[in-house]
Amino acid sequence: MTNNEDIFKKVTAHCKEYGFVFQSSEIYDGLAATYDYGPFGSELKNNIKDYWWKSMVNLNDNIVGIDSAIFMHPSVWKASGHVDAFNDPLIDNKDSKKRYRADNLIEDYVQKINTKIEKDCLKAEKKYGNNFNRQEFLTTNKRIVERQQKIDKIEKKITLFLKENDLPSIKNLIEELDIKCPISGTCNWTDVRQFNLMFKTQVGANQDTSSDLFLRPETAQGIFVNYLNVQKTTRLKLPFGIAQIGKAFRNEIIARQFIFRMREFEQMEMQFFIKPGEEMIWYDYWKKSRMLWHKSLGMGEENYRFHDHENLAHYANAATDIEFNFPFGFKEIEGIHSRTNFDLKAHQEKSGKKINFFDAEEQESYVPYVIETSIGLDRLFLAVLCHSYKEEKLDNNETRVVLKIPAFLAPIKVAVLPLTKKDGLPEKAKEILGELKLLYNCKYEEKDSIGKRYRRQDAIGTPFCVTIDHQTLNDNSITLRNRDSMEQKRIQIEDLNLIISKKTSYINVVKAIEE
Ligand code: ATP
């Protein structure tokens, strides 16, 4: 097991042990690819949502929010192209009877070559020390150049085959590369077939008269079909955006990596409506803006990168992913797509309702173009946890597990801890708690030694612990312990709010983006 796989396993176990994420229906042995958020998980998730909503809706004068229904008229999905084209190519191994996404098998193969390149780089770096020039090594080392050429060739082929829906060639490529089923170890593959990812359900009690509905596979369509309502009621002029946070459902062929790929998940999407012809300006604007937002979380600039798409979805004329460096490699966390006027036009045609914007300056009407930013809330949650999980060796040789969650996102901001359960300390602690909980999400604990209580707060990522002791009763001073440095400071109760709010407010984070 690599170090990173080990960390990922530990994060997954930690999530369960400390009430962040549970397997859905666990007492019935669970339901694959479905998870529930526990007490601390739901707080963290709410804080992430809140930060996104504030920075997207509250801080932009021309972006408003909506909350549309999950059920939508079936024609929506016909018009949007999802009924015909929201497919993944699947393939089965005849020996193991296991099902895979054909494009993922090829992606994993490419990832293995990338890992080999990385290993060679590390070896060379060790050998040459300070004289090592990574860029030069990557472009001149014969073995690496050959490997990179192989990757480029494979990626070019798969992009083309997916674009042309050439399923036999995808199968040929898998066979040509001698990709084996990880379970059976054989290349005994079925043909590749397309599989629609939408979940179907029915409305109405009577099966015969009921009609098929789909669980929405993206929140975006709820925004498009409300474009006219929102534009008319808010009287916003282009460019303007509509944002929404909500559940989406996809019948993923295989669900992997814990909450990274689920069948029920949550998206935070914003559709930005613009004048046709301005799409590349706004596409670049939102690319930059979203990357800055991610970096504002303080999880290391080096952990983000763009991955521009060659294989574009049926609605897009440009697309990129913001990828985060998860323990299992760089993977998509947010997609930014230039969706043209595909969706609005399709809904206009299918519904027969005019979906136009009248541009008073140009004295003309047109169907707006759209730039979409779409982020997976659960993936961001996972990124925060993976990045925050630390095991630290202490001076006394013990190890502490601490979640160094960005303080403004932490589920609990302050723990209030009386040193002992007697001598009036709990009463004093509850008095302080009474004030603090009006402002912050707090936790009160009086059981176990203070050391054990500090460790428990570290494990759920609480940035501050306030300890009340006998001296507090005399001079109104408390001990404030910092999660990250473990430093303990004696301060007056009246100074608490200023220190905690400075560190846990999202305002400084937002200001850092603006600078
Ligand atoms: P992928 O290539 O990983 O399947 P996608 O490109 O299909 O993702 P989009 O349709 O662009 O994803 O959806 C926008 C965002 O929704 C993604 O960036 C991702 O964060 C999130 N997302 C998509 N599918 C899932 C899923 N099955 N589970 C969790 N989050 C998801």
Image (tube, rainbow, N blue to C red):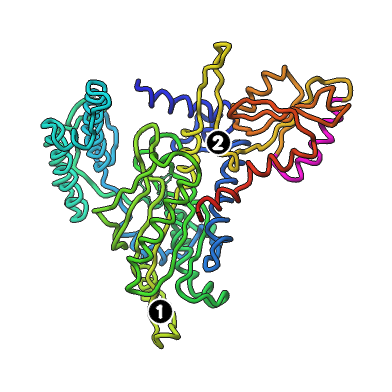
Label 1 Cα neighbours within 10 Å, binned few <14 / some 14-19 / many ≥20? few
Q: Nearer the viewer, residue 466 or 348?
A: 466
Residue 214: give x, y in percent of width and height. 44, 56
Look at mark 2 in the image and give the residue it sits on: 405
Q: Earlier in the sequence, mark 1 or mark 2?
A: 1
The overriding secondary structure of the stretch rendered in magenta is: helix
Q: Is residue 203 above or below residue 27?
A: below
Determine whether label 1 and label 2 are within 8 Å by CB: no
Q: Left or right of 95: which side holds 67?
A: right
Query: What residue is at 60 percent from the left and 51 percent from the top?
Result: 507
Q: Residue furthest bottom?
A: 363
Residue 402: give x, y in percent of width and height. 56, 26
Quarter holding residue 343: bottom left
Look at mark 1 in the image and give the residue it sits on: 352
Label 1 – label 2 distance at C-alpha = 49 Å
Can residue 206 be seen at all in this image of the molecule? no
Instruction: Specify the amino acid type for callout 2.
Output: Ile
Which region is colored magenta?
425-441
Query: What residue is at 30 percent from the left and 52 percent from the top?
Result: 87
Query: What residue is at 26 percent from the left and 21 percent from the top?
Result: 126
* Quadrant of the snapshot with the N terminus: top left
Q: Nearer the viewer, residue 398 or 36?
A: 398
Q: Is residue 473 above or below residue 75?
A: above
Q: Nearer the viewer, residue 93 or 247?
A: 247
Q: Nearer the viewer, mark 1 or mark 2?
A: 2
